[in-house]
Amino acid sequence: MPESRRLESAHVSGESLDLLLIGALSPAVANAAKAHLDECEACRVRWRELNEDKQRFEEQVYARTLPKVVARSGSHAVLRRRWPPLAWVAVGVTLAAALALGGFLARRSPTPLRPGVSSTLVVPVRGR
């Protein structure tokens, strides 16, 4: 749904409130939503509840689980663990071989035909 249509109804949609909370609305739509929140008590109540939920999540869930996730991932070294250095070497060698083969085949390709010349190969057959 285009951003401009989210605010055409009588109230700010739940989706728009979520996007406003994470800062994902364009400045114009965010300003329109904030202006609506200043005028509409029902939307303001929903906005306040959403912010309280976010705050509770950050205090009770995020703060408790983030250190465990970081410890389990080896201080953000997940990608290094999944792709050991030898794998990167193999990828590099494969890429170099593919480029070398492509260059070799490009040099061996026949010269382009002149316009009007057939590309059919005629092979003479000796006596039968």
Image (tube, rainbow, N blue to C red):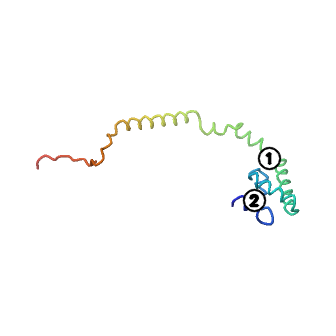
Q: Position of residue 98 (x, y in %)?
A: 45, 38
Q: Is mark 2 on a helix, strand or loop?
A: helix
Query: Residue at coordinates 45% horizontally, 36% vertically from top-left?
Result: 99
User: Is 69 left or right of 116, judged from the image as shown?
Assistant: right
Query: Residue at coordinates 21% horizontally, 47% vertically from top-left?
Result: 122
Mark nearer the viewer, 2 or 1: 2
Check disc 2 and give the amino acid type: Glu
Q: In the picture, which quadrant includes the N terminus?
A: bottom right
Residue beneath disc 2: 15
Residue beneath disc 1: 62
Identify which residue, 52 or 80, lies in the foreground.
52
Q: Where is residue 12 in the image (x, y as percent from the top left)?
A: 79, 61
Say which label, 2 or 1, has the lower sequence index.
Answer: 2
Identify which residue, 93 or 11, lies in the foreground.
11
Q: Position of residue 48 (x, y in %)?
A: 86, 56
Query: Residue at coordinates 74% horizontally, 43% vertically from top-left?
Result: 69
